[in-house]
Image (spheres, helix red, strand yellow):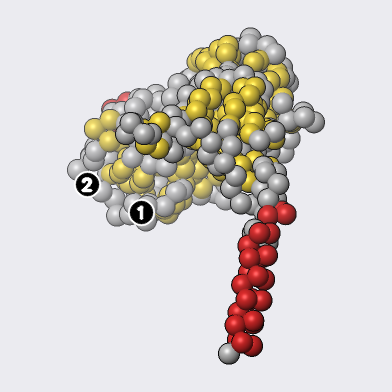
């Protein structure tokens, strides 16, 4: 019994001694060691507001009650303590902020497009600088080195801080294309060549913030409106200013232009026949509609620095083409078909009168006069994608001559027909589509 009592006394003394020493971790609780912010930094859109929590902790990360002080606040932001956070009741039953508390909350508002700002919080002799990155919403405009360049001139677009261009940045403007040549080493400038007929601000897509490249992307707009000259016509030279009907006309572009995507040329809205672009893309050869006078219209031409942006404009100079066959709108005035010698062919060209409701619909009519029955082959081609047929009508205009091999959907059409002596009529019939500007006949005996 005494042994038990003495043991109990020893244990009590030991416990008392231990209790005098306090918490075994007290040696690590040396007050505030550092401050912790949640989040550790802020990304905030201009004009927006958010909150941030700041805590005072010891070496072990345990919260420590203390007083907090707001220090220096950088440009472009406002910071105030959230007076509705962590309120306690005082002895009068009123909610008040505590004099000492392990944490405090601040309300942060971005007031301008400042790229990088910060504010300082102090507590327990420790300071914490909290970075604030402002993400612009009211974008500052870009600048142009020249708002009225000549065609082919390069201009430089400069991004305002804190924006940077990227390889994916694309410049565009109303009226025409813009070609990007490159980005400066610091990514703040974009060198471009504007196309013709641009009138308006330049927009550049896929720009980023230099301090937060993963945020965005953003689009910048130039402060000034870009204005470039329009291309209303193009200088060109003709192989002949007065080509005969059916003659090939070669049109050569002036320096600085090329034919692209095959090129095309029309004459008063009528397509030329068999256009062929030269290997160097500087010229095109085509048979113009007989009887045409005026400036040809060139399609699919482009400035050499903007080959991806074809335009359509007339030439400066005009051309006068020899007259085609006349009277094809009426059998009474139908021109005579030239008849080749045996074993030979003759080609003749016609635009003449429009297709008229002369015989079997919308036709062009030609007279064939033979001294004796003759077998002839007729090949018909034309300058667009209409559906044209070859028909034959007897001299009395009372019926067809049974040669219908040319009434198909082919282009060109070809038919061989045994024609009687005397006069009969060859007909180019517009079965479907728009009347072509050039009719090409080849007659073979």
Q: Is residue 427 above or below residue 120?
A: below
- Looking at the image, the residue that sits furthest to the front is 2
Q: Is residue 385 left or right of residue 129?
A: left
The answer to the question of whether label 1 and label 2 lie on touching residues, with beta carbons closer than 8 A, is: no
Given residues 91 and 291, the one toward you in this image is 91
Q: Is residue 293 above or below residue 414?
A: above
Residue drawn where x is 28% and y is 36% of the image: 362
User: Residue 192 occupies which quadrant of the picture?
Assistant: top right
Q: Secondary structure at mark 2?
A: loop
Q: Residues within 10 Å of mark 1 (few under 14, many from 20)?
A: some
Residue 342: give x, y in percent of width and height.
54, 49
Determine if residue 296 is in view: no
Q: Is residue 305 left or right of residue 348?
A: right
| Residue mark closest to the camera, 1 vs 2 | 1
Q: Mark 2 = which residue?
A: 399
Residue drawn where x is 62% and y is 31% of the image: 121
Determine if residue 419 is in view: yes
Q: Secondary structure at mark 1?
A: loop
- Give the Cα separation between the discs numbered 1 and 2: 19 Å
- Looking at the image, the residue that sits furthest to the bottom is 1
- Looking at the image, the residue that sits furthest to the left is 398
Residue drawn where x is 64% and y is 15% of the image: 143
Residue 136: give x, y in percent of width and height.
55, 26
Q: Is residue 102 left or right of residue 6?
A: left
Given residues 255 and 223, the one toward you in this image is 223
Quadrant where the image shows the N terminus:
bottom right
Q: Mark 1 = which residue?
A: 408
- Looking at the image, the residue that sits furthest to the right is 185
């Amino acid at each position: 019994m005494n042994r038990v009592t003495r043991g109990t006394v020893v244990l009590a003394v030991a416990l008392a001694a231990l209790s005098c020493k306090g918490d075994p971790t007290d040696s690590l609780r040396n007050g505030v060691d550092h401050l912790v912010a949640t989040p550790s930094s802020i990304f905030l859109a201009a004009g927006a507001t958010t909150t941030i929590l700041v805590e005072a902790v010891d070496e072990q990360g345990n919260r420590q009650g203390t007083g907090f002080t707001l220090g220096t606040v950088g440009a472009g932001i406002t910071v105030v303590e959230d007076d509705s956070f962590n309120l306690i009741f005082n002895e009068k039953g009123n909610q008040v902020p505590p004099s000492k508390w392990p944490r405090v909350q601040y309300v942060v508002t971005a007031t301008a497009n400042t790229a990088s700002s910060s504010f300082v919080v102090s507590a327990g002799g420790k300071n914490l600088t909290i970075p604030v990155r402002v993400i612009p919403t009211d974008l500052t405009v870009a600048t142009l080195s020249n708002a009225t360049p000549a065609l082919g001139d390069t201009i430089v677009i400069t991004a305002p801080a804190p924006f940077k261009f990227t390889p994916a940045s694309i410049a565009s403007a109303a009226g025409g294309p813009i070609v990007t040549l490159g980005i400066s080493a610091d990514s703040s400038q974009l060198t471009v060549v504007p196309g013709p007929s641009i009138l308006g601000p330049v927009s550049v897509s896929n720009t980023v913030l230099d301090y937060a490249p993963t945020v965005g992307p953003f689009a910048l707009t130039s402060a000034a409106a870009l204005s470039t000259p329009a291309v209303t016509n193009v200088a060109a030279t003709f192989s002949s200013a007065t080509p005969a009907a059916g003659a090939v006309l070669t049109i050569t572009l002036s320096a600085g232009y090329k034919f692209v995507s095959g090129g095309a040329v029309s004459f008063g809205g009528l397509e030329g026949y068999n256009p062929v672009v030269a290997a160097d893309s500087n010229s095109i050869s085509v048979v113009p509609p007989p009887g045409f006078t005026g400036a040809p219209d060139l399609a699919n031409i482009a400035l050499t620095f903007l080959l991806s942006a074809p335009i359509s404009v007339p030439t400066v100079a005009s051309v006068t083409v020899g007259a085609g066959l006349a009277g094809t709108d009426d059998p009474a005035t139908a021109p005579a078909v030239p008849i080749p010698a045996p074993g030979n062919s003759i080609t003749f060209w016609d635009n003449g009168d429009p297709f008229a409701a002369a015989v079997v619909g919308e036709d062009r009519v030609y007279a064939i006069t033979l001294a004796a029955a003759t077998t002839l082959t007729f090949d018909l081609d034309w300058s667009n994608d209409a559906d044209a047929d070859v028909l034959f009508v007897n001299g009395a205009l009372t019926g067809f001559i049974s040669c219908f091999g040319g009434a198909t959907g082919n282009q060109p059409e070809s038919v061989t027909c045994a024609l009687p002596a005397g006069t009969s009529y060859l007909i180019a019939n517009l079965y479907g589509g728009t009347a072509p500007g050039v009719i090409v006949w080849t007659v073979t005996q």
